[in-house]
Image: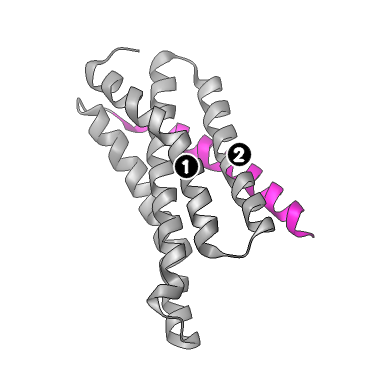
Amino acid sequence: MGFETRVILSSLLAGVFEETTRYFMVRYRFHNKDLLGEVLAVGLGWGVMEALIIYVLQALIASTYYGYTWIDLMPGAIERNWAIMFHVAMTLLITYAILRGSVFYGILLTGSLHMLTGLLAGVVLAYTSDPWLIEALLGVIVVGITLPIYYKIPRRLRTGST
């Protein structure tokens, strides 16, 4: 299987499975009056657990057995922070969609954004092997997607307005 096929499939599957799972977690989990706090906790927890599984374990192995230094591993740590930022935003967005009653569009929108982010990261990776440039471009993509969500949705969750 070629690089392009793997990027497309992994992006598509991450969007479909992660966002559908996130929907069910948010839909059937939240009962607290502090909805915003719970949403942020789930988004942060999701991102941090993914970072532990995908990055931390491999970084420990790479540094211990292959002699990578912290500067070699830094781009991956930066990427995981972008991912945490993204997962918090997707949790906010799916929660907002649930509160508005537009579940299908919420899953469709968050799944599409997840897939698009993965595809764009794959395209960047295909054209450059410089990890610092990859992380800079990925940061621009993630910040561009998440800032409007961070700006609008927490205020609406706090006030209860949709």
Q: Is residue 137 left or right of residue 64?
A: right
Residue lying at 55% horizontally and 35% vertically, measured from the top left: 113
Quarter of the picture containing the N terminus is bottom right
Query: Which quarter of the picture shows residue 26?
Result: top left
The picture places residue 120, in percent across and down from the top left corner, at 62, 45
Q: Is residue 123 left or right of residue 76?
A: right
Residue lying at 42% horizontally and 28% vertically, measured from the top left: 93
The picture places residue 152, in percent across and down from the top left corner, at 34, 22
Query: Which quarter of the picture shows residue 55?
Result: bottom left
The region drawn magenta spans: 1-30
Residue pointed to by mark 1 = 142
Residue pointed to by mark 2 = 116
Q: Nearer the viewer, residue 146 or 2?
A: 146
> Is residue 27 something one can see in this rendering?
no
Q: Nearer the viewer, residue 68 or 32?
A: 68
Residue lying at 53% horizontally and 35% vertically, measured from the top left: 20
Quarter of the picture containing the C terminus is top left
Query: Which quarter of the picture shows residue 148?
Result: top left
Q: Is residue 101 left or right of residue 44?
A: right
The picture places residue 40, in percent across and down from the top left corner, at 29, 38
User: Is disc 2 surrounded by few (<14), some (14 to 19) or many (20+) residues within 10 Å?
Assistant: some
Distance from Cα at disc 2 to Cα at disc 1: 10 Å
Considering only order in the chain, which callout, 1 or 2, is on the residue closer to the N terminus? 2
